[in-house]
Amino acid sequence: MPISAALLSASVILPGPATDAWTLGASLLLFGCSNGAMDVGMNVHAIQVERAYERPVMSAFHATFSVGGVLAALLGALTLGLGLGLAGTLGTVALFGVVMAVAATPLLLRPQPAATHEVESTSGRPPRRIRVLAALALMLMLCEGVANDWSALHLRDILDASPASAVFAYGAFATAMTVGRFLADGVSARFGAMAILRYGAALAGLGPATAALSPWIPLPLVGWTVAVIGLSGCVPQLFSAAGHTDRAAAGAPESPGSAISGYWPVPLSSGR
């Protein structure tokens, strides 16, 4: 995790000086590989921490990730307003990220044996329930990506908003994601992770429809925000469920709904 974090931080600066599609593509390839490796490491480490706490904390980790998005949106708006150079901004962010990666290394937990049983798989592939969780996570993260990557373009290209106004679409996304994730652990402990997944995903379906049908700039901002609030707690619940799998769930019926509930960690659904 520290190595991938350092590589990701250093690769932030590469897209800035890119001169053509090939150099930009190569820099984004390195950035994406480092980001993917760090994402996996962070979530696996978060599972270890959650086991030690014996209560839901995964969403809080994802919330602090979203805090970085809020700060980035504010920083981007500030640099655009001040007319600062791209190279200086990216260089500062890269240096800060490398320093943080090095400083955080001694604070990480050492690998520990899993508190639950390993999931048996005779085919060498993940069990069916894990594949169902992965498919659900894929669909939900595609929805997150739509709000993350296209909400600002929607305001700018479809509704003719100014670039400064369009930036607030991502700001609304990051803020709603942060608030929703900070609240999700408490909701999960009280009502269960399935409630977050079921009703959050349903709420997320209302937001894009509102944004797509409205010609008035403030209403799409509300629509994207509602969608993100619904999505905010869903993916962390799936990650947590996959990380706490055990053989006790093996007798559950093979259906998508039971695949999630069957592999839900007992401490997370007991209200502790």
Image (spheres, rainbow, N blue to C red):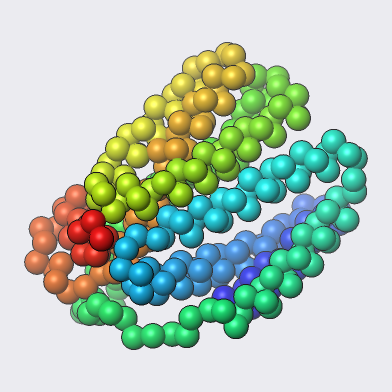
Q: Looking at the image, is 160 positioned above or below residue 10?
A: above
Please indicate, yes or no, whether residue 36 appears anywhere in the rendered image.
yes
Q: Looking at the image, is 194 positioned above or below residue 120?
A: above
Number of callouts: 0
User: Which residue is pictured at 68% across the width and 78% down the height?
Assistant: 102
Q: Nearer the viewer, residue 207 or 77?
A: 77
User: Which residue is pictured at 32% across the width and 63% down the height?
Assistant: 55
Q: Looking at the image, is 58 positioned above or below residue 222?
A: below
Q: Position of residue 252 (x, y in %)?
A: 11, 61
Q: Is residue 92 left or right of residue 233?
A: right
User: Which residue is pictured at 46% across the width and 56% down the height?
Assistant: 60
Q: Choose top left, top right, bottom left or bottom right for residue 254.
A: bottom left
Please indicate, yes or no, whether residue 150 appears anywhere in the rendered image.
no
- Quadrant into which the N terminus falls: bottom right
Q: Choose top left, top right, bottom left or bottom right for residue 202.
A: top left
Q: Is residue 154 left or right of residue 46?
A: right
Q: Looking at the image, is 158 positioned above or below residue 243?
A: above
Q: Position of residue 197 (x, y in %)?
A: 31, 45
Q: Nearer the viewer, residue 2 or 192?
A: 192
Q: Position of residue 255 (x, y in %)?
A: 16, 53
Q: Nearer the viewer, residue 103 or 226?
A: 103
- Quadrant into which the C terminus falls: bottom left
User: Which residue is pictured at 85% across the width and 50% down the height?
Assistant: 86
